[in-house]
Amino acid sequence: MRSHPFVGLGLGLLMLIGSGCGGSSPSATAFHVSGTVQFDGQPLPAGKIYFTPDSSQGNQGPQGVAQIVDGQYDTSESRFGVVGGPYIVRIDGYDGVQPANDEDGLFPDGQVVFRDYEVKLTFPQENHVEDIQIPAAAGKKK
């Protein structure tokens, strides 16, 4: 009885994937971050927040991301959290008003209020709440 060469290759690949993707590695564990984002003392209507491990501080791992809606964000909604440690957090803010002439839906979050506001934060290796205040001066950097 002869087996097809791809059967052995496929079984070997399945064993390799099964042994390497258990998710038990501490570096692969993602924790959720949630909180509020205020711009000039008011909840930011819409935006996106990015959590990039600060490699200059020795932090490695995937980037986390979350949508900001009515001043609230939660990485558990995007499934991309943080691994803990030092991060560079970047925020893009929008006014939340989709333009009337946007029939194609290209600007669902509205007009840009500010882009690339950055802050360096250190997160614990656990789920965490982090509220962020963005000064009005950030709105001048469009």
Image: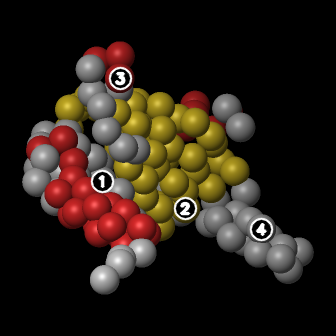
Of pointers 2 and 3, the one earlier in the residue sequence: 2
Q: Nearer the viewer, mark 3 or mark 4?
A: 3
Query: In this figure, which residue is indicated by the disc labeled 2?
Result: 46
| Gap in angstroms between the C-alphas marked 4 and 1 | 26 Å
Q: Which residue is mark 3?
A: 55
- Vertical comparison of 47 with 83: above or below: below
Horizontally, residue 65 falls left or right of residue 1, namely right
* Mark 2 or 1, closer to the camera: 1
C-beta proximity under 8 Å, tags 3 and 4: no
SS class of the residue under badge 2?
A: strand
Q: Which amino acid, by three-letter code, is at mark 4?
A: Leu
Of marks 2 and 3, the one in the foreground = 3
Binning the other alpha carbons within 10 Å of mark 2 as few (below 14), some (14 to 19) or many (20 upward) gives: many
Mark 4 vs mark 1, foreground winner is 1
The tag earlier along the polypeptide, 4 or 1, is 1
Residue at the spot of label 1 = 81
Identity, as a three-letter code, of the amino acid under mark 1: Gly
Quadrant in which residue 136 is drawn: top right
State the image coordinates of residue 36 (x, y, percent, origin top left): 34, 56
- Most extreme residue toward the bottom is 1
Identify the element where label 4 is drawn. Answer: loop
Q: Residue under circle 4? A: 106
Q: Residue at x 53, y 35 (%)?
A: 117
| Distance of label 2 from label 1 (alpha carbons) | 19 Å
Mark 2 or mark 1, earlier in chain: 2
* Amino acid of disc 3: Ser
Q: Is residue 105 visible?
A: yes
